[in-house]
Image (spheres, rainbow, N blue to C red):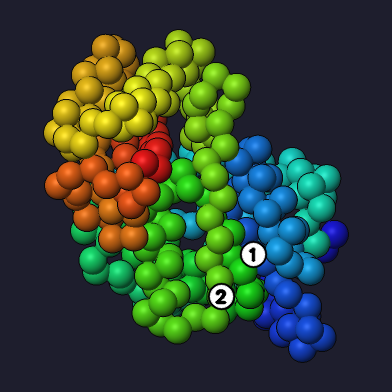
Amino acid sequence: MQTIQSVNEMQSHAIGLRSSGRLIALVPTMGCLHEGHLSLIDIAKEKADKVIVSIFVNPTQFGPNEDYDKYPRMLEQDIEKCRERGADIVFNPSLSEMYPEGFSTYVNEEEITDGLCGISRPNHFRGVTTVCLKLFNITRPDIAVFGQKDAQQCAVIRKMVEDLNIPAEIVVGATHRDPDGLATSSRNAYLTSLQRQEALSISKSLNIAIGMVEEGVRSVDRVVAEITHHLSLSRKVRVIYVQIVHRDTMKPAREIIPGKQVITVAVWVDQTRLIDNALI
């Protein structure tokens, strides 16, 4: 397995791979890799000849009072996990490589980003789309693999790829969960054992909602109210939003239509912000 830090070297290598007819898959990450990330590498290996994992903690998607400085960084362990999982290249550029002095160009998606996390995290998705477009231009992937846990991000990236005619297929892997049901996330490392127990109310509330839909409930308000009530029973959990939205547009649903929508949840568990969702 190769590790590459230089943008120019990575770009040249990717161009060479494509010229030789190799299919390239990219798994973009911010490191602190967990089983969810590794499951995306597995998907990438099934679909492509060469798998590139990018590891870059992207400052432009963090707000001024967010956790960029303390975001967990475990590069050596991450590289070893990529090697064990069968990745071909780890691309881990420096901040100056990705955002050299004088950088001033950003990418905005202006519809899907309006709601949900776009409200509480201004400019977050501008940072996501900008860094992803840069990574696409640098690694030249035929396929890019993202996780369903970041449902709004997936919809935004799909839209960017469509609108800007980017020749890459976006593949979304299912949300990976630990045995207790908590969706895997790098920010789970912030949780104490008590906070983690409280955080389990997220997946439990989503399971309750799925059960209601399977039983024929079609009222958005009723399902949202049940999720919110269940979350409110956990003292350390504060709801940021609970919404049922259309999978592609992230616009609020008026009535539940199975197979078309996703239940989205964002909460604070004390000082840790967690998101989760469930397709319905």
How many C-alpha atoms fall within 10 Å of the one at disc 2: few (<14), some, or many (≥20)?
some
Label 1 Cα crowd, 10 Å radius (few <14 / some 14-19 / many 20+) = many
Q: Is residue 31 visible?
A: yes
Q: Residue at x 48, y 48 (%)?
A: 148
Q: Is residue 139 left or right of residue 60?
A: right
Q: Is residue 227 above or below residue 172?
A: above
The percent position of residue 107, horizontal first and vertical second, equals 36, 74
Q: Which residue occupies 83% across, 45% down?
A: 84
For mark 1, give the secondary structure.
strand
Q: Element under label 2?
A: loop
Q: Quadrant of residue 201?
A: top left
Query: Is residue 60 something one can see in this rendering?
Result: no
> CB of mark 2 within 8 Å of CB of mark 1?
yes
Q: Reading the chain from its start, which is encountered first: label 2 or label 1?
A: 1
Q: Which residue is mark 1?
A: 26
> Mark 2 — residue?
168
Determine whether, in the image, residue 278 is placed left or right of residue 20: left
Q: Position of residue 31 (x, y in %)?
A: 61, 47
Q: Amino acid at mark 2?
A: Ala
Position of residue 239 in the picture relative to residue 35 (left or right): left
Quadrant in the rendering for residue 11? bottom right
Name the kind of residue labelled 1 in the image: Leu
Q: Relative to 224, is 63 above or below?
A: below
Viewer-proximal residue among 257 and 220: 257
The nearer-to-camera label among 2 and 1 is 2
